[in-house]
Amino acid sequence: HHASQQFHTYRSSFEEGESTTTVAAVSDNDNSNGEQYEIHWARAPSTMVPLSQPPLLLLQSSTPIISRDACSLLSQYFDYRKNNDGADNTFHHCLDKSQMHMAEALLNNIHDVIDEVTNCPKHDGEVLVPNYVCYESTAIDKTLLRDPQRFGNTLLPDGLHVDTNNGKLFRHLTAILYLTDNQDGFSIEESYGTTDNGQSSSMMENAFIAGGGTSFPLAVPFNENNGVLQHQHNNLRDVAKRLLERDIYHTKGDINESPVSNGRTLEKAALDIFHRDNMNALSGISGRYNYRFGNMRYDGGRGVRVMPEAGKLIYFHNVDDNGMADPMSFHGGEELLITVLSTLQQHHGNSDKSPRMAAVNITKSILVFFKEIPLLSFRDRGREGFAEEAGKSRMWTKNMYY
């Protein structure tokens, strides 16, 4: 570490009524001007809460594992890394060395928490730098809501996938850390500015913000009755199995554009659960809105959609008890969509419709960590050895949290 940088450890509140060890770095260089920065260390939650019934093992931390300030620091850190990989140094001023060190220390700490809650210690050969994905919001017109195919391609442009690295099955578990809060709902934004002739003006914008979830259309919610839509669920599982049997691990890899093709069927199932969660709002936005859930009766018993909460962690197993890619683990990340319902600009009490957009600027950021079965643990036993090790990991999750 830089000689002029000092680290101090002290106690600080993380959540109401609780405390955790915090690190602050004080640096007199790198443009920090002696400012004090503080972050919270990651902390293992009291438990991981099951979100789906077996065979899919999908769980979420009972509490955030890092603070919102820590989420913000990590977003800045990865934006900095992304923008400084090339010639663009726009973000150079955003982070000094002390903040870089803090972000890296926090990242190591997060790895330790994930290792603990999954019982999968990191090892040589495992990728330690997580995938950082940042979604910018997309403005859409109300007419798009009445076109399920176009809307589905906008909400889930990359379709769905399983995380076995295109069939390389050492990757058996995925953890996602959410760095932002994203919820479906209505937003009213008011912005203030000055017109071209110097008059003050304000603009009110009413918008519907949706998307941002992580969609698991084959999951059966943990608290649902096992008998709910079992026939429909079995059909969907068979569709997912057929994709994997054809070595297709991303639904966009199924180039058959027929609405009843395997890839389109799974994508539509993800669209179904989005509409299930937003049916009332969408019906209110568009009087002609009448989305139908395929040709099947649908009453919301299938599919899990995880909405981001800053600092919350989810993890899920990608392979089944036989060591094969789990068809139930097909999932996809939704884009953030904004439908502007009305924009009203006011100049000294006079109102008129303005085509300009107000500043609804929303992003979604996640970190994706992949855990792999150590090659040395099964190398001499081949696929059967891998299946045994993956099965042990699944059994640990079930015994610990289910």
Image (tube, grey):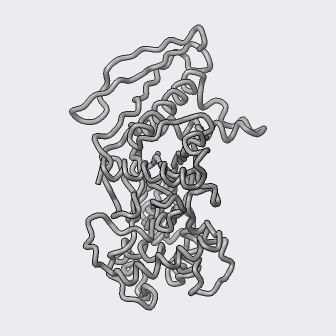
- Taking depth in this image into account, of 136 and 11 the one nearest to the observer is 11
Which residue is situated farthest in the left direction here? 17
How many numbered marks does the figure carry?
0
Is 155 placed left or right of 20 in the picture?
Answer: right
Residue 326 visible from this viewpoint: yes
- Quadrant housing the C terminus: bottom left
- Taking depth in this image into account, of 174 and 178 the one nearest to the observer is 174
Going 44% across and 91% down the picture, which residue do you hit? 295
Which residue is situated farthest in the bottom direction here? 295
Name the image quarter holding residue 112: top left
Going 58% across and 55% down the picture, which residue do you hit? 383
Name the image quarter holding residue 123: top right
Going 69% across and 78% down the picture, which residue do you hit? 255
Name the image quarter holding residue 185: bottom left
- Quadrant housing the N terminus: top right
Q: Position of residue 32 (x, y in %)?
A: 56, 20
Which residue is situated farthest in the top direction here? 3
Residue 362 visible from this viewpoint: no
Which residue is situated farthest in the right direction here? 87
Q: Position of residue 343 (x, y in %)?
A: 48, 67
Task: Establish if 133 lies above or below 75.
Answer: below
Task: Establish if 54 lies above or below 375.
Answer: below
Going 48% across and 63% down the picture, which residue do you hit? 329
Q: Position of residue 124 (x, y in %)?
A: 60, 34
Q: Position of residue 285 (x, y in %)?
A: 41, 78
- Taking depth in this image into account, of 302 and 38 the one nearest to the observer is 302
Is 238 placed left or right of 59 in the picture?
Answer: right
- Taking depth in this image into account, of 69 and 225 the one nearest to the observer is 225
